[in-house]
Amino acid sequence: MELAIDKLIEKIIEKKSPIVMGIDPRYEFIPDSIKNKYEKNLTGFAKASTEFAKKLIDYTYDIIPAIKPQLAYFEMMGPDGLIAFKEISEYAREKDLIVIADGKRGDIGTTSKAYSNAFLGATKINENEEKVYNSDFVTVNPYMGFDAVSPFVEDCEKYNKGIFILVKTSNKSSGELQDLYLENGKQVFEHVANLVESWGETLRGKYGYSSVAAVVGATYPEQLKKIREIAPHTFFLIPGYGAQGGKAEDISLGFDKNGLGGIINASRSLMCAYKSERWSGTYSEEQFAEATRAEAIRMRDELNLGIKLATK
Amino acid sequence: MELAIDKLIEKIIEKKSPIVMGIDPRYEFIPDSIKNKYEKNLTGFAKASTEFAKKLIDYTYDIIPAIKPQLAYFEMMGPDGLIAFKEISEYAREKDLIVIADGKRGDIGTTSKAYSNAFLGATKINENEEKVYNSDFVTVNPYMGFDAVSPFVEDCEKYNKGIFILVKTSNKSSGELQDLYLENGKQVFEHVANLVESWGETLRGKYGYSSVAAVVGATYPEQLKKIREIAPHTFFLIPGYGAQGGKAEDISLGFDKNGLGGIINASRSLMCAYKSERWSGTYSEEQFAEATRAEAIRMRDELNLGIKLATK
C-alpha cells in the first residue's frame, strides 16, 4: 500500500494543483437556492451543507487533489452535522479526492487513540473493527507532547494515513505561544518543527516527505522559510492564503526545487467565489459551483506561477 | 444569572465533594449485562454507552457535582456517539449536574466560534438561535493564542458558561512543550498560567475564581503548586488522580484555605469500580453502579481529608 503522503503528492502532480478546498459550511456561505429547500433548523442546515459541498466537489474534483472539511462547522450542527461530514467525506473519496479532517485533536494517549479511531483507524467492538469517518489525514495539536500524538502516528503506519501537526498557525495571536523564545535562543515553533520532523522519520515516502506533516500558515513567511530549513522532510498544509492575507510569493518559500512541499488551503475564497467582486458579475448565485471552479483554476495558475518563479 | 464557576463551586460545597466523574465509555468498560442488549456495531455501542452512563448518574448525582464526558470516545462511535453525548448531557442536567465537555478544542477565531456555538452558545440559522449541546464548560487548547480562545470567553460572558484551558496536562510527555524554559527563565506552562489568569479577569465570581479556568494535572505536584501561586483566581480541573498516579496530598496543593480551588476528575476508577480489586468482591457486575457509588464516597472522603489536612 502507498503512503498517504505519496498519494497526496501524486494527486497534486497529476492535477498540477497544490490546492485543498476547505469545506467550512457556515450558514451565510450557502446560497439561498439551496438553503430554501430545507427546514430552518440544525437538520436542515446539515442537509443544505451536504448538498452545497457535493456540488462544489462535482465542479472541482478534476482540478483539485483534496478537500479539508473543518469539523467545528459540522460539530455546531449537532449529530446531524457529523452525518453530513461523513457523507461529504465519502462522496469526496468516491471522486478520488484526499480528505483532510480538520479537527486539531489531541489528548492523553488513550484518548488520542479514540480520536485516531474516529478519523484514521477503526473502532473495535469485540473482534470487529468498524471504520468511522475514514479520513486520509487529520490535523493534530502538539501542546500535550508526543504521547498525545503517537496513537495517530501508529495508525498512520497501520492504515496508511497521515496527520498534519500544528507548528505555526496563520492566526494573528499564534505568536503568543508559538513565537516565544526559549532559553536556547530558539522559538517554540522551531522546537515543534524539530519534533515533527523527527516524529515522521519512519513514514517518509518516495518524494522525501513524511505522512507525519505540519500545519504552517502562509501569513508568516519568515517563519515558513525557517520551518522549511529545520524540517526538510516535513510536508506543509498551508492555511491563510487569500482571505487571511498570504500571497503566492510567501507560500513558495515552503516549496522545494521540484515545486513540491506543501498544499495550500482555500476555504472562503473558493466556497464563496460566487459572492466575490471578481466573479459575482459573471456567475449568478445559482451558478455558485461554476464560480468556485473558475476561482480554483485562477488560484491554481497563480500559485503554480508563484511557486515556479520562486523555486526554479 | 449566576456565573458558571459559582454554580460549580456551590455544588461542590453543597455536596461536600470536589469530584467530577469522567464519562469515557470505552467498550471494555461497559458491563456485559448492558452490552448484550445491543447490537455489536457503532449504534449499539452508542446506545449501550448511554444506558451505562445514565445508570452511573442515577447512582451518583446526589454525591457528585459534575460529569465530564470525553468527546473522543463519543466521536469514535460516529454520529450516533454524538447523539449519545447529547442524551447523556441532557440527562445529567436534569439531575442538576454540571456538564464539562472535554474536547480540548481550539482553532482560529471564526472556527473557535463554531466550536463555542456547539458546546457553549448557540448556532444561528437566520434569526433563530439553536442550542446544540448546551454544556456548562468545555476544555480548550491554548496553542494558537488568545484569538483562538476569545470566542469561548465571549460566550462564557453571554451565556454564563465556563472553559478550562490546558495549562499543565497529566500525561507523561506533557513536558515536551509545557516545561520548556523560556529566555526569561520561566517555563511555558507558567507563561500559559499567566495568560489564563489574565484572560479570566472579567469573569471572577463570589468565591474569587473565574469562569475562565485551567486544566492542571495531579501528576506534577510541583507545577500544580507553582500554578496556584501564579494564578490565584484560576480554578483547576485536575485530571490524573488515581489510575494515573496523582495522590490526595499532591492535589491539595491546588486548594485555598477554604478548601476550594479545584475539581478532581476520576474516570476509570469510578466507571470501572465494579472491576476493581477493592469492590469486585462486594458487588457483582450487575451491581456496577453501586460499586461506582461506593468508590465515589470513598474517594470523596479521602480527598476531603487530604485537602483539609493540607489547607487548615
Image (cartoon, coloured by chain):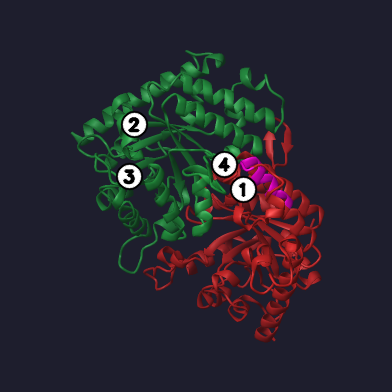
Chain colours: A green, B red
For disc 1, the marked residue is: B74
Identify the residue at image location x=78%, y=68%. B63
B41 within the magenta span: yes
Q: Chain of mark 4?
A: A
**Quarter of the N terminus of chain A within the rendering:** top left
Tag in front: 1 or 3? 1
Q: Chain of mark 1?
A: B
Circle 2 is placed at which residue position?
A18
Q: Residue at x 69, y 74 (%)?
A: B299
Q: Label 1 vs label 4: CA separation?
A: 15 Å
The reply to whether residue B241 is visible in this rendering is no
Alpha carbon of mark 4 to alpha carbon of mark 2: how far?
Answer: 24 Å
Mark 1, secondary structure of its residue: helix
Among the 4 quarters of the image, the one containing residue B57: bottom right
Residue underneath mark 4: A72
* Left or right side of A150 for B11: right
Which image quarter is the C terminus of chain A in? top left
Label 2 crowd (10 A; few <14 / some 14-19 / many >=20): many
Residue range of the region highlighted in magenta in the rendering: B40-51
Badge 3 marks a residue whose secondary structure is helix
Give the quarter of the image for residue B110. Answer: top right
Say which amino acid is labelled 3: Pro
Task: Provide the residue designation for mark 3.
Answer: A221
Q: Nearer the viewer, mark 3 or mark 2?
A: 2
Which type of secondary structure does the marked residue at label 2 adopt?
loop
Q: Residue sitting at 72 percent across and 46 percent down?
A: B37
Q: Position of residue A298 (x, y in %)?
A: 37, 22
C-alpha span from label 1 to label 2? 34 Å
Dot 3 and dot 2 within a common chain: yes
Q: Is residue A146 placed above or below B86 in the rendered structure?
A: below
Q: Earlier in the sequence, mark 4 or mark 3?
A: 4
